[in-house]
Amino acid sequence: MANPTHHPHIVVHAPALDGSRRVTEGDVTLGLASHLDDVVEILRLADLDRIEVEEDDLIEWQGGGPDEWPGLSEHEL
């Protein structure tokens, strides 16, 4: 029986050298994000789209918040 008070613990990990960030729930990797929109889509696919990505306390942002995507400007042409 599921615990109705259980809240997922989502972690958006610190950026890798290419600027991508791993998104996990507990020990499970949900996906790899290169932009905030990717995090939203990863959570939607995991049926966690009720979470407000930029404001929800259920998401732990490591190595910078939702506006931190280093490496992206380095790849622009």
Image: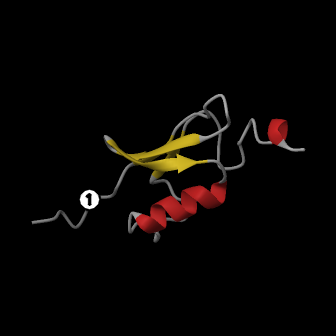
Depth check: give the residue in front, 70 or 18.
18
Residue 53 visible in image = no
Q: How is the image coloured?
A: secondary structure
Q: Residue at x 52, y 37 (%)?
A: 13
Q: Position of residue 32 (x, y in %)?
A: 52, 46
- The residue nearer to you, when weighing 46 against 6, is 46
- Quadrant occupied by the N terminus: bottom left
Q: Residue furthest left?
A: 1
Give left or right: position of 3 versus 29.
Answer: left
Tell me if residue 33 comes above or below residue 14 in the rendering.
below
Location of residue 76 by image quarter: top right
Q: Residue, x 71% and y 42% (percent of image)?
A: 69
Q: Residue at x 90, y 44 (%)?
A: 77
Q: Residues within 10 Å of mark 1 (few under 14, many from 20)?
A: few
Helix, strand or loop under label 1:
loop
Amino acid carrying mark 1 in the image? His
In this picture, residue 2 sits left or right of residue 7 = left
Front residue of 53/17: it is 17
Left or right, 44 with respect to 1, comes to right
* Side of 19 where 33 appears, left or right: left
What is the number of callouts on the image? 1
Q: Position of residue 55 (x, y in %)?
A: 59, 59
Q: Is residue 44 visible?
A: yes
Q: Which residue is mark 1?
A: 6
Q: Is residue 40 above or below residue 69?
A: below
